[in-house]
């Protein structure tokens, strides 16, 4: 009587050892993912670094963003504003107080995603009177690519006579990463999504000078 019980216990322990464990953590689900926002903001930062503002230092500039239509426009406008300040311009609170009005424009600010797979993608089989049967993906190798792209520029004119003060050809910033899976093993390539939280020493930045002449890269 004892021997069958011992055998059942041994079998249960063996099965438990062979079955992988699983932990599920409940997370909030906002409408937009952090990954999408990081892709967009990084693309904006890289495009803003390419902006060249050829205005005399101390010029009072009013940024006109009425034609700047894009996702995350607030962050993009702030990045452009930062670039003007880093170039020596002074921000004016209104058109009346400005020497120059800079009209901002956005050509693109969005993300793209693509997948490449070696294997069988997931698909559904219609079952009469029962709906569709979803078959899982069977991939030997899979690549998921996500890219963020920002394209914007500006044209500035003097408020005194409306003449051209400065302009720039559209600048482009690209961000992205690739996720790879090979025979169940996965890895990440790209510098957009950090693999670890930076420490305090890496976050230190030089304080901008009061005269606005310090150059600060986003």
Image: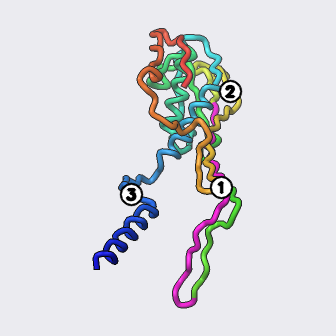
Compute the Cα span from label 1 to label 3: 24 Å
The disc label shown at residue 24, or none? 3
Q: Earlier in the sequence, mark 1 or mark 2?
A: 1
Is residue 15 inside the magenta stretch? no
Alpha carbon of mark 2 to alpha carbon of mark 3: how far?
50 Å
- Regarding mark 1 in the picture, which secondary structure is present there? strand
**Between tags 1 and 2, which lies in front?**
1
* Nearer to the camera, 62 or 193: 193
Circles 1, 2 touching at the beta carbon (< 8 Å): no
Task: Answer yes or no: is residue 113 visible.
Answer: no
| Quadrant of the drawing holding the C terminus | top right
Q: Are marks 1 and 3 in contact (CB under 8 Å)?
A: no
Residue bearing mark 1:
142
Q: Which residue corresponds to mark 2?
A: 168
Viewer-proximal residue among 154 and 158: 154
CA gap, disc 1 and disc 2: 40 Å
Going 33% across and 71% down the picture, which residue do you hit? 6
User: Which residue lies at the image location 53% right of the left edge and 28% below the top edge?
Assistant: 63
Q: Is residue 150 left or right of residue 10?
A: right
* Residue segment shown in magenta: 128-153
Q: Earlier in the sequence, mark 1 or mark 3?
A: 3
The label number, if any, that marks residue 84 in the structure image: none
Q: Residues within 10 Å of mark 1 (few under 14, many from 20)?
A: many
Q: Could you tell which of marks 2 and 3 lies nearer the N-terminus?
A: 3
Q: Quadrant of residue 153?
A: top right
Residue at position x 36%, y 74% from top?
A: 8
Q: Is residue 129 magenta?
A: yes
Image quarter of the N terminus: bottom left
Which residue does the image show at 64% across and 53% down from the upper left? 182
> In the image, is residue 133 above or below residue 9?
below
Residue 97 percent location from the top left of the image: 47, 19
Q: Quick one: SS at disc 3?
A: loop
């Amino acid at each position: 009587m004892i021997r069958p019980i011992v055998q059942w216990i041994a079998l249960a322990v063996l099965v438990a050892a062979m079955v992988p464990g699983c932990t599920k953590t409940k997370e909030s689900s906002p409408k937009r993912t952090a990954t999408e926002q990081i892709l967009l903001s990084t693309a904006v930062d890289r495009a803003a670094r390419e902006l060249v503002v050829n205005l005399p230092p101390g010029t009072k500039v009013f940024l006109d963003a009425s034609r700047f239509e894009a996702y995350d426009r607030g962050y993009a406008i702030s990045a452009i504003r930062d670039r003007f300040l880093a170039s020596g311009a002074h921000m004016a609170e209104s058109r009346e107080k400005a020497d120059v009005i800079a009209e901002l424009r956005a050509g693109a600010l969005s993300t793209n995603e693509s997948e490449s797979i070696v294997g069988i993608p997931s698909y559904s089989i219609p079952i009469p009177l029962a709906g569709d049967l979803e078959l899982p993906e069977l991939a030997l190798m899979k690549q998921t690519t996500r890219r963020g792209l920002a394209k914007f520029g500006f044209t500035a004119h003097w408020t005194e006579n409306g003449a051209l003060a400065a302009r720039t050809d559209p600048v482009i910033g690209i961000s992205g990463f690739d996720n790879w899976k090979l025979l169940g093993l996965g890895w990440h390539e790209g510098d957009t999504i950090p693999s670890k939280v930076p420490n305090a020493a890496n976050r230190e930045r030089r304080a901008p000078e009061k005269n606005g002449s310090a150059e600060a890269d986003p």
